[in-house]
Image (cartoon, rainbow, N blue to C red):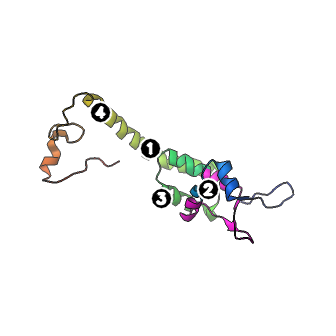
Amino acid sequence: MRSSDEWGTRVELSVGQVAQRAGVAVSTLHFYEAKGLIHSIRNAGNQRRYPREVLRRVAVIKVAQRAGIPLAEIAQALSALPEKRTPTARDWQRLSTRWRQQLDERIERLTRMRAQMDRCIGCGCLSLKNCPLRNPGDILGEEGAGPRLLDPL
């Protein structure tokens, strides 16, 4: 997909223009490019130039990040698009549907944690044997000595 102006000339944006229009730092664009999330071409002066479509790609990345999707997963999803094209509305529907289950699971886990915290707030016990948040039913003691991780986020 190539964007062009009204005369058919290919529209290319500088890294500063993309950063300003997308609302991200130039360093963010460099990072995304290093991770393969976006691509630029170099002009005769060896300066980065981006097609206008990169703005939509950056928007998709930022929305997915705000939803808590790990960058590696975003990169994997975008790399699966044909010819590394800019995501269309249909592509976004597929991507967001794919991530919805993960988000629902995260929301459920956080809701449970919030409810447990509400029961604990103010008790001040910080009991390592009986605390329903850190060690419900002393299940960690049954696993032996040393640190344990209950539910990694």
Task: State how far apart marks 3 and 2 are (Cα).
Answer: 20 Å
The earlier-in-sequence mark between 2 and 4 is 2
The residues colored magenta run: 30-58
Q: What is the crowding at mark 3: few (fewer than 14 residues within 10 Å), some, or many (at least 20)?
A: few
Left or right of 111? Residue 74 is right
Disc 1 versus disc 4: nearer the observer: 4
> Considering only order in the chain, which callout, 3 or 4, is on the residue closer to the N terminus?
3
Question: In this rendering, is residue 12 above or below 152?
Answer: below
Of circles 2 and 4, the one toward us is 2
**Front residue of 86 and 9:** 9
| Callout 1 secondary element | helix
Q: Is residue 48 magenta?
A: yes
Query: In front of the other: label 3 or label 2?
Result: 2
Asked whether residue 29 appears in the rendered view, the answer is: yes
Give the residue pinned by disc 1: 103
Residue on which the image places disc 3: 72
Tell me the amino acid under the disc marked 3.
Ala
- Amino acid of disc 1: Leu
**Quadrant the N terminus occupies:** bottom right
Instruction: Tell me the quarter of the picture where residue 130 sits.
Output: top left
> Which of the two labelled residues, at mark 1 and mark 4, occupies the earlier sequence position?
1
State the residue in front, 94 or 106.
Answer: 106
